Amino acid sequence: MSRARPDTSAPPNARASALADALAAKGLVPDGFLDVVKERATEAWSPRNGARVVARAWVDPEYRRRLLADGTAACAELGYAGPQGEYIAVLEDTPDVHNVIVCTQCSCTAWPVLGLPPDWYKSPEYRSRVVREPRRVLHELGLDLPESIAIRVWDTTAETRYMVLPLRPAGTEGWSEERLAALVTREAMIGIERVPEPG
Amino acid sequence: MDGIHDLGGMAGFGPVAVESDEPVFHDPWEALAFALNALGIAALRAYNADEYRHAVERMDPAHYLAATYYERVLTGVATLLVEKGVVTHDDLERRAGGPFPLARPVAEHPTADLVRQPRARFAIGDRVRVLEIHPTGHTRVPRYVRGCRGVVVHVAPAFSFPDASAHGLPAREEHTYHVAFEAPALWGDAAARNEQVVVDLWDAYLEPA
């Protein structure tokens, strides 16, 4: 095979259409299949789901206990399950330990609670560097962690899918679950930022 | 394979660029590429997720790094559907109106001879060492932990062993372990203290340490 020459290749949109058309011409694309997948990817699998899990864990100590003991079952309690969510482990941040997730070999992510991963998570920059120099990478992204705080990087190399349970920010005492969930970002559940204090 | 995809610890890459309010897909063709992979795996059952990952890993390294994520998805899916005889490369290039680069072929002897481990050999707290292996096919043991010592912090259920299922070998299930490595055990004594990397590893990749 000749060396790949992406610069002379047909553009990716033309290649994607070519593959879809070639399959359709053989009658291999069931009616509606592609649209259902696209809708799940953009609507059903969402970091808003994970944010609700985090908010519930912040207000309900019994749910928090179940979530840390069996993430898969506790996420399913709220209706979040499915592909890439078959075995979910939830990583608890504490004042002394900060967790951060990566997939160095591809881009594995807990789709039902985090959604499809963003480009930065799939980039060679993040995948190569965050296991080697996590404190520096987090600093570059605006999260300064003193050396007294341990950093634990979780590489998604097998079938476990991770989600970080971040620290609840100060100034949110007495807040409702809905109001708390609105604070929780995908980036905080991956571990490159903290949930910001309100105000 | 010791390929370009196995990026953990590689030096030379710059800052991570985070896009604010990033959409799930930047362009409709990205959603199409994602959906075609779901079609290939779940509807056509033409290949499995391990074969898919390996197809992406087999891309030319320069193409892999230059491509966006969904171009890698598209290349992996198209490669497998051509290799499985579902579509032809000529037909794809004719319809695309130009070259449609695919990944390189699977290695001739892709699997390492790893002893099957049907029962969990390790428990939480056990010290383990990762085997120094270099399979030329698909494997999920990253280069940066091979030969290194760590401690089991969690025993996960048994899952299909990817080195076998990516290459059409009989399915075998083995436990995976979350193994914690102190940074100096991976990167040398100059590495920062108070940092750990936890890697999820199948039983057959490990030996007692």
Image: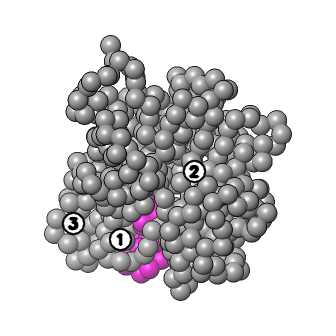
Which residue does the numbered mark 1 point to in the structure image? Answer: B40
**How many residues crowd mark 1 within 10 Å: few (<14), some (14–19), many (20+)?**
many
What's the CA distance linking mark 1 and mark 2?
27 Å
Residue A51 makes an appearance in the image: no
On the image, the x and y values in percent for residue A177 come to 25, 34
User: Do marks 1 and 3 share a subunit?
Assistant: no
Return the mark for residue A33. Answer: 3
Which residue does the numbered mark 2 point to in the structure image? Answer: A155
Residue that sits furthest to the front in the current view: A62
Q: Amino acid at mark 2?
A: Asp
User: Do marks 2 and 3 share a subunit?
Assistant: yes
Left/right placement of residue B56 relative to residue A60 reads: right
Image quadrant holding the C terminus of chain B, namely: bottom right
Q: Quadrant of residue B110?
A: bottom right
Q: Main secondary structure of the magenta part?
A: helix
On the image, the x and y values in percent for residue B199 come to 61, 54
What's the CA distance linking mark 1 and mark 3?
11 Å
Q: Nearer the viewer, residue B114 or B27?
A: B114
Q: Amino acid at mark 1?
A: Gly
Residue contact between numbered discs 1 and 2, judged by CB atoms under 8 Å = no
Residue contact between numbered discs 1 and 3, judged by CB atoms under 8 Å = no
